[in-house]
Image (tube, rainbow, N blue to C red):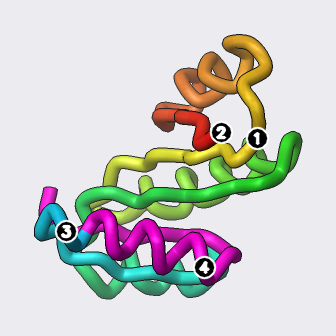
């Protein structure tokens, strides 16, 4: 994978992720909202979308909507959802599996 798109509303967190990924020679694009992220996926060849969510409950709906939109594209990227909340059992990861999205926890 050479092009990673970060979707995160926290600009400081975006900068930290961008720096870490660029250190490994990934090309990185960052968006602070899903609408811009969808536009980026439509106009650029993106291999991986890293969606970051601090929401404890709303992440599933956001991820599902994003997944549905990008899966309609000819070269749909892999989606990784980073949850910025404490681990609370396997339900989030199982929901991610159901959606075809990898889920990891930052905290």
Q: Quadrant of residue 90?
A: top right
Q: Earlier in the sequence, mark 1 or mark 3?
A: 3
Query: Would residue 84 appear left or right of 25 to someone viewing this image?
Result: right
Q: Secondary structure at mark 4?
A: helix
Comes first in the chain, label 4 or label 3: 4
Query: Residue at coordinates 52% horizontally, 75% vertically from top-left?
Result: 14
Mark 3 closeness class: few <14, some 14–19, many ≥20 residues within 10 Å? few
Residue drawn at x 76%, y 41% as measured from the top left: 85
How far apart, in angstroms, are the residues tagged by discs 3 and 2?
22 Å
For this view, does 104 lie left or right of residue 87?
Answer: left
Q: Which residues are magenta?
A: 1-21
Q: Position of residue 92 (x, y in %)?
A: 70, 25
Could you tell me how far apart the alpha carbons at marks 1 and 4 are, in whole angstroms?
17 Å
| 54 vs 32: above or below | above
- Distance from the alpha carbon under mark 4 to that under mark 3: 17 Å
- Image spot of residue 37 (x, y percent): 51, 78
**Residue drawn at point x = 60 percent, y = 79 percent:** 12
Residue at mark 1 to residue at mark 2: CA–CA distance: 6 Å
Dot 1 and dot 2 residues touching (CB under 8 Å): yes
Write down the residue under mark 3.
Answer: 23
- Identify the mark at residue 85; answer none if there is no mark: 1
Q: For the residues labelled 4 and 3, say whether their Cβ atoms are less than 8 Å apart.
A: no
Pointer 2 residue: 107
Earlier in the chain: of badge 1 and badge 4, it is: 4
What secondary structure is found at the residue carrying circle 2? Answer: loop
SS for callout 3:
helix
78 or 19, which lies in front? 19
Left or right? Give the position of 63 relative to 21: right
């Amino acid at each position: 994978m050479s092009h990673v798109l970060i979707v995160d509303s926290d600009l400081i967190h975006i900068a930290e992720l961008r720096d870490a990924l660029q250190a490994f020679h990934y090309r990185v694009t960052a968006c602070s909202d899903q609408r811009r992220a969808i536009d980026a996926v439509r106009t650029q060849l993106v291999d991986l979308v890293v969606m970051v969510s601090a929401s404890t409950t709303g992440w599933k709906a956001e991820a599902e909507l994003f997944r549905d939109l990008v899966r309609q594209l000819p070269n749909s990227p892999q989606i990784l959802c980073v949850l910025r909340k404490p681990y609370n059992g396997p339900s989030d990861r199982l929901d991610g599996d159901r959606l075809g999205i990898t889920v990891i926890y930052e905290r």
